[in-house]
Each structure stands twice: as C-alpha cells, then as structure tokens.
Image: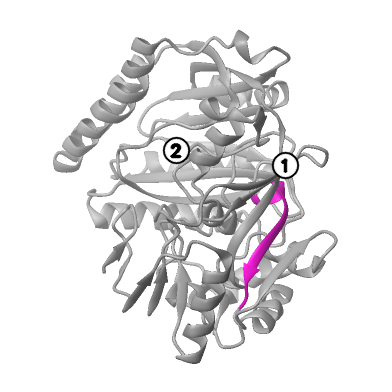
Amino acid sequence: MRWQNWSGLESAEPREVLSPATPDEVVAAVRSAREARSTVKMVGTGHSFTGIAAPGEVMLRPDRLTGIVGVDRDAMTVTAYAGTRLKVLNAQLERLGLSLHNMGDIAEQTLAGAVSTGTHGTGGVTAGLAAQLTGFQMVTGAGEALDASGATNRDVFELGRVGLGALGILTTVTFAVEPAFLLEAHEQPMSWDEALDSFDELVADSHHCDMYWFPHTDRMLTKRNTRLDADLSEASPVGRVRGWVDDELLSNTVFGALTAVANRAPAITPRMNQVSARALSARTYSDVAHRVFTSPRRVVFREMEYAVPRAAGLEALREVRRAVDSSDWRISFPVEIRVAPADDVALSTAYERDSFYLAFHTHHRSDWRTHAAYLAAMESILREHDGRPHWGKLHTRTAVDLAPAYPRFEEFLALRDRLDPDRLFANPYLRRVLGD
C-alpha cells in the first residue's frame, strides 16, 4: 500500500499495514516490529507538510482507534483515542455540552497528529492543543504502555506533549475542556497601515485575533473572535446561502480555480489578488466555538509557518512585505498572521515566550522554483528574528540549529534515548531534526 500526505509532497510504501483497534493491539504491533528489528509508525490523516509521520516498514492506520473513552465532569477532562479526528471530537464534545478552549482552523487531523506537531490556534489563554492536554498514554519503543500526566511520569508529560512521534505511539489523550460556549466573529477588510497600526489594540480587545495579508496588495482581512456570555440557543450563524457562497464557492471553488489559473499565467496574480481583496466585505456572526474556529480547506496547498517572539512580529511582517514587493515572485495565497501566549510545553513553538506566527502558503501545483525561492527567503527573515518552525510544516532546519532554539532540547533527546533506544519510530525527517 502506498501512503501519501495531503499535499502530495511525501510518500512511502510500507511493507506491512495494520489497523489496531485497541491500545493492546498497538503494543503487540510495536513488540512485533521490535523483534523483527524494523520501524513502525502510526500515521494520521497526512495533513503535515513535512515527512514527520511518513511510515517506514510497518504502518499503523488510526481508523479504528477512535472515539471518546472517558468524561470526567468533576475534573473537566475528556479522554479520547488518539486516532480520533479533531472534527469528530468537536462534534462529540458539542453533544456533551463541552468544548476545547482553542484550536486551529483545520479540523481534519487526528488528535495524535495535531498535538504531536504543535498545532495551535490564535490568542486565548492557551493557543496550542498540546498545552490543553492533562495526560496521555503512549506505547514506547520497549512495547510498553506508559501513562503520563502532571502526577504520573511527569518528565514524560512535560517533554512529550509535543513529542513529534519520536518517543512512542500515542493511544489516548486527555484534554482539559470547558462548558460549550459561543464565539462572535467579526470579519473586516482593512488597509495594511490600518491593520498594523491597530494590531496591538485589536489583539488586546479580542479573545482570538488573526489577519490575512494579500501579497501584491495593500489589503488585509482581519478576524476577531469574542466569547459571548450567552446561551448556545442564542447563536446567530452565517445564513446557509451566504455561508455557502463565502466559505464554499468563494473560499474554495472560485479561489481554487483562480489560483490554478495563476499557476499557468503568473502575471495575473497581482491583479487577481487586488480584485479578491477588494471583493471582501465585513460580516459578523456567532456560533458554537468549533464552528467559528475551523473552516473547510479544499484547495490543496503547501505551507511553511514560523513563530517569532511577539515583540518582533510586526517588524518581521514588514520585512516580509518588503521582500515580496521587491521580488518578481507571484504569490496567490494570503499570508496568515496569528499570535499565541507563552506555554510550558518543551517543544512547543510558544515555549516560554509570547509568539507571533507568520504562515506562507503556495498552491500545490505552483512553479517549484518560485515556491522554493519564496519560502527560503521567508525562512531567512524569520530565522533572523529567532524564529521557530512549525514541526508539521515546511522548513529546512536540522538538529544542530534547532537545539539552541529550545532550552529543553537536550532533555528531549535524552528522553528519546530512554523510550526509543532502538529508533523504532525514526524516519528521515526525525533524523534530520533530532539527529540519529
């Protein structure tokens, strides 16, 4: 069976494919791989752009390791199998009257993949999914099921919440949850100067705030989400017709067609972005949190994202624009801008510092030379600002230059040596970013 990730950048052909339905079956698969001196990897849905989840000789599929397995309303935690997709968890939590505090804008990933790569949203008390974990169970390279939390195997919990799939195979994850709540979203086009001049105020006045700059234009789209102290029945979602037009027709169908045309005729890109940005209009709506946080993404793209210190963010963004404006690149996808509070997750991009995120997208069929030059230039700018790359998105970093970016990097490597000394879970990407 051939495995390929969503963007088409990574592929593999494992010799054996298994679909475990219980943690015990994962234990058995790992022990078998260890006896055979082979490698084993649980894949997710392939939404990482890097090869972080690329399987080697034995591939475990997550399809049967799904669903909520425990709800503790006193502790306000929910435990789910790690193969559960985020969108499935969101729907099940909504039925229970519960919600995660924060999440990113894509809900297709498995829980294991999302937490292990450092997936995050914007704003809030915590932005990253891993920072919302209170515990997890993993199967180590010794074929042993290990529970980790703030009270049990604390070192594994502290270091392994963003574990990159290098420490073991996650079987269950336990999240802190909240009573379900409404978010009111305010989407508003702004000029570049207006958005940057008011950025700090917009962030301070919103629970969650992100922005999108359209390259080759002076236009931004801002989105501010505010928690409402209101009953869920008082939601005022986008109407069915406008929701279909805005989120399906314009954001996916039309956008996909336009970017595909721009691939064949790059010269039209600046004008296309101007028209697209000018066509945006303000809208306000409210809904259950996960329906506001997440949106469908049907246009296949490739992405790089970096986190720089919050204080350096706006200057880094200005440098990004200067580089784009002075180049002959033609970039059809907006640049995404988000912020996050510091957290205590060792390999989180927001570890011990408030962070400013810049994400760069290109169409999956765009000219590779332009694509590579654009991302290389953006990475160079953000590295100058002490940037940390998203583990599941494109970057060129290696263990040598990643180690100084994370104060607990060497501790993580030592834990990897302890939990997976035979490197059952290794693959080329992990060898690059962690060493052998």
Q: Residue at x 34, y 11 (%)?
A: 241
Q: Which residues are magenta?
A: 130-140
Residue 425 or 77: which is nearer the viewer? 77
Q: Inspect the magenta stretch and tell me whether residue 136 lies in it.
A: yes
Q: Nearer the viewer, residue 121 or 30?
A: 30
> What secondary structure characterizes most of the magenta part?
strand
Q: Nearer the viewer, residue 7 or 274?
A: 7
Q: Amino acid at mark 1?
A: Pro
Can the viewer see residue 425 in this picture? Answer: no
Residue identified by numbered label 2: 335
Spatial CA span between label 2 and label 1? 20 Å
**Relative to residue 137, is residue 319 drawn left or right?**
left
Q: Residue at x 37, y 23 (%)?
A: 247
| Position above or below: 80 against 1 | above
Q: Give the amino acid at mark 2.
A: Val
Inspect the magenta stretch and tell me whether residue 308 lies in it: no
Residue 163's disc number: none
Residue holding disc 1 = 341
Q: Position of residue 113 (x, y in %)?
A: 52, 56
Helix, strand or loop at label 2? It is strand
